[in-house]
């Protein structure tokens, strides 16, 4: 009960913020869109989805390039992506902090600095690949578990190869946070080849 009581103010603050962004209307008060047949609740849900950003790209890609958080691709990773000769999707993670069974808390979401760093990193990487004539797009993934999100992207886009930066963390850190290379290799199996740029 004490934990629940601690999260009640956060829930009320989040709900107040949502109402203020939507002009003070609650979902039940939003008028239905004219001629679309949507109810007020449906219109409110669609508006919230639009606030979360554009739908993820789903066009087929040959290669998925995974960036390290807040870091643009290294020269080695760019060279490896160009050498494949295929179409490329660049992915970077924005980490949700905390654990999977925690109650929703806006304080655990990526902050403004982290979002800006991810946007700069993926924009720079995509721009450099395009200047080399590579057919490429980019995607920022807000997730707690990067390996699951990346596997979903690889399968949705039909990619057969995943390129990663070499691991820079210590062995202890990889043990605690998980080794992305091993996680992706295990989950993708023979459907895609996972390699690191060297």
Image (tube, rainbow, N blue to C red):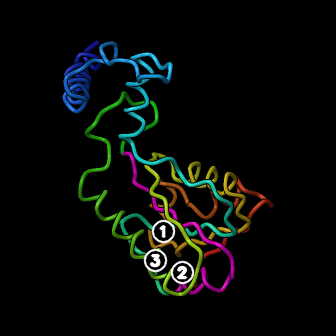
Seen as rendered, the residue at the extreme right is 190
Q: Which mark is residue 77?
A: 2
Helix, strand, or loop for circle 3? Answer: loop
> Which residue lies under the disc numbered 1?
67
Badge 3 vs badge 1, beta-carbon distance below 8 Å: yes
- Measured in 3D between alpha carbons, the distance from the residue under mark 3 to the one under mark 1, in whole angstroms, is 6 Å
Q: Earlier in the sequence, mark 3 or mark 1?
A: 1
State which quadrant residue 86 falls in.
bottom right
> Which residue lies under the disc numbered 3?
73
Seen as rendered, the residue at the extreme front is 35
93 in magenta: yes
The residue positioned 22% from the left and 33% from the top of the image is 21
The x and y percentages for residue 180 are: 56, 60
Helix, strand, or loop for circle 1? Answer: loop
Badge 2 vs badge 3, beta-carbon distance below 8 Å: yes
Helix, strand, or loop for circle 2? Answer: helix
Badge 1 vs badge 2, beta-carbon distance below 8 Å: yes
The x and y percentages for residue 77 are: 54, 81
95 in magenta: yes
43 in relation to 68, above or below: above
Q: Nearer the viewer, residue 185 or 149?
A: 149
Residue 26 located left or right of residue 184: left
Q: Residues within 10 Å of mark 3 (few under 14, many from 20)?
A: many
- Measured in 3D between alpha carbons, the distance from the residue under mark 2 to the one under mark 3, in whole angstroms, is 6 Å
42 in relation to 108, above or below: above
Residues in magenta?
A: 76-96
Q: Please state, as top left, top right, bottom left or bottom right, where the N terminus lies in the image.
A: top left
State which quadrant residue 122 falls in.
bottom left
The x and y percentages for residue 64 are: 61, 66
């Amino acid at each position: 009960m004490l934990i629940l009581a601690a999260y009640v103010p956060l829930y009320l603050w989040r709900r107040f913020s949502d109402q203020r962004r939507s002009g003070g209307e609650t979902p039940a008060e939003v008028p239905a869109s004219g001629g679309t047949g949507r109810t007020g609740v449906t219109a409110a849900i669609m508006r919230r989805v639009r606030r979360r950003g554009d739908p993820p790209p789903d066009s087929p890609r040959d290669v998925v390039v995974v960036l390290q958080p807040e870091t643009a691709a290294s020269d080695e990773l760019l060279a490896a992506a160009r050498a494949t000769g295929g179409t490329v999707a660049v992915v970077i993670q924005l980490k949700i902090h905390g654990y999977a069974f925690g109650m929703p808390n806006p304080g655990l979401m990526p902050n403004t600095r982290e979002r800006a760093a991810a946007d700069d990193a993926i924009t720079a990487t995509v721009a450099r690949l395009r200047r080399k004539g590579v057919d490429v797009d980019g995607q920022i993934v807000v997730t707690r578990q990067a390996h699951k999100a990346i596997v979903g992207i690889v399968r949705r886009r039909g990619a057969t190869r995943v390129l990663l930066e070499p691991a820079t963390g210590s062995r202890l850190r990889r043990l605690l946070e998980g080794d992305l290379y091993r996680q992706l290799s295990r989950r993708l199996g023979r459907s895609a080849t996972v390699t690191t740029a060297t």
